[in-house]
Image (tube, rainbow, N blue to C red):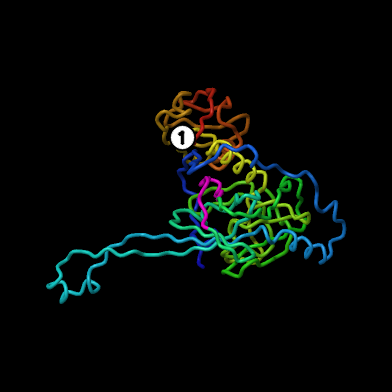
């Protein structure tokens, strides 16, 4: 593994590019408008309730929660063309140069957890992205084919569904807002195919940004609980056995640095997929670049039919403030946009030909 930071299912890290597109992409695959499957966050602090932490607390949580953690195996089939006999010139004089179709099979492995007794499962989008076949295995070794209910590519989350005649064990959500740096957490998953491996650590930091595979994550939980390839999509839990994050990434060249999507984000994405089939993401519609020797960002492009175009933004504008927050770099504008809501009216401050101007912008919804 050569990447400094990588998604747990191996991918290469990309550097932050000078020109960034301020747009968040989301698409739904299939959905069911069923309000009874919506979930909510708990409001208890595991550390406050548990007091002094002892190993017995950990083992009890694992026994309670492990049955709801699943192994996810995927198959991706792609058609490739291969010349007969490896394109040997001797054989080509008999067979010609036409190519023979061949199917390449790629297998993937990840984790997930059940959130409803009738089979709704949460995992990472990168675990199942592009899969032709998805199989879920329970702790009982029962195997089920899974269908994709919906995905959020931007936030790397996916909802799956399996059909079981029996009621399935489930996990509930705890508050990622209330959990504190230093609190104990438990990760369960399938690293390297080792089913239901349990690791324990603490919350090392909160609100971490991370750039992986052309995706920008913000507000991640950092943990030193061991996370390895195959852990993707598995739960990170507090000592109440509540999910406070979804394990998604690891620093491959450093020990004890893993990242999880906070439960506040996971619950929001899951409920939107279940209720309406897509996830709303704020959308501005500009490309930008950093400025040399001064704070702010320069607009390098305006997307047609975008909120930015409707508000009158032009190439060459220097953006210095967005929604009341100073903008000194492309990253700050990205973060400020992500904190808004579709339909929200915000004020953008810019400089154009030496004049300061204010633009009123109604944020768009990238899913529409």
Q: Is residue 226 left or right of residue 136?
A: right
Q: Residue 139: x, y in percent?
A: 64, 64
What residue did someone put label 1 on? 286
Task: Examine the rendering and report whether any part of residue 5 can be seen.
Answer: no
**Number of marks:** 1
Q: Where residue 3 sits in the image (x, y, percent)?
A: 51, 63
Magenta stretch contains residue 154: yes
As drawn, 236 above or below 333: below
Q: Which residue, as the protein is rendered here, is positioned at the far right?
A: 51
Query: 344 or 241, which lies in front?
Result: 241
* Residue 124 in picture, x, y percent from top left: 56, 53
Image point 69% across, 50% down: which residue? 206
Compared across the picture, whether 196 is left or right of 318 comes to right
Residue 224 in magenta? no
Give the left or right position of residue 112, taking residue 99 as reference.
Answer: right
| 285 or 52: nearer the viewer | 52
Highlighted magenta segment, given as a residue range: 145-160
Q: Residue, x 64% and y 65% (percent of image)?
A: 140
Q: Nearer the viewer, residue 166 or 237?
A: 166
Q: Quadrant of residue 301?
A: top left
Residue 172 shows in the view: yes
Judged from this view, the residue extending furthest toward the left is: 93
User: Secondary structure of the magenta portion, mostly?
Assistant: strand
């Amino acid at each position: 593994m050569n990447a400094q930071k990588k998604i747990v299912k191996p991918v290469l890290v990309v550097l932050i590019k000078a020109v960034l597109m301020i747009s968040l992409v989301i698409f739904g695959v299939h959905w069911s408008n069923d309000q009874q499957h919506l979930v909510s966050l708990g409001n208890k602090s595991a550390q406050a309730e548990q007091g002094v932490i002892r190993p017995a607390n950990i083992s009890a949580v694992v026994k309670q929660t492990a049955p709801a953690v699943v192994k996810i195996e995927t198959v991706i089939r792609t058609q490739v063309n291969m010349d007969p006999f490896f394109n040997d010139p001797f054989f080509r004089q008999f067979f010609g140069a036409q190519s023979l179709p061949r199917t390449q099979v790629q297998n993937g492995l990840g984790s997930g957890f059940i959130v409803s007794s009738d089979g709704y499962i949460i995992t990472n989008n990168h675990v199942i992205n592009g899969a032709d076949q998805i199989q879920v295995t329970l702790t009982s070794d029962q195997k089920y084919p899974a269908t994709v209910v919906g995905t959020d590519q931007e936030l790397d989350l996916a909802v799956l569904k399996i059909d079981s005649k029996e009621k399935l064990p489930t996990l509930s959500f705890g508050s990622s807002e209330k959990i504190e740096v230093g609190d104990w957490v438990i990760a369960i998953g399938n690293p390297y195919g080792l089913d239901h491996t349990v690791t324990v650590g603490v919350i090392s930091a909160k609100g971490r940004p991370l750039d992986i595979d052309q995706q920008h994550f913000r507000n991640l939980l950092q943990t030193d609980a061991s996370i390895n390839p195959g852990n993707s999509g598995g739960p990170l839990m507090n000592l109440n056995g509540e999910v406070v994050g979804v394990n998604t990434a690891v620093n491959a060249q450093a020990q004890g640095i893993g990242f999880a999507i906070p439960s506040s984000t996971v619950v929001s994405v899951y409920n939107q997929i279940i209720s309406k089939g897509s996830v709303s993401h704020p959308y501005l519609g500009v490309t930008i670049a950093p400025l040399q020797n001064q704070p702010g960002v320069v607009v390098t492009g305006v997307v047609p039919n975008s909120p930015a175009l409707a508000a009158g933004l032009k190439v060459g504008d220097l953006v210095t403030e967005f929604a009341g927050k100073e903008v000194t770099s492309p990253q700050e504008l990205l973060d400020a946009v992500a904190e808004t809501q579709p339909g929200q009216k915000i004020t953008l401050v810019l400089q154009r030909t030496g004049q300061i101007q204010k633009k009123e912008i109604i944020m768009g919804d990238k899913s529409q």
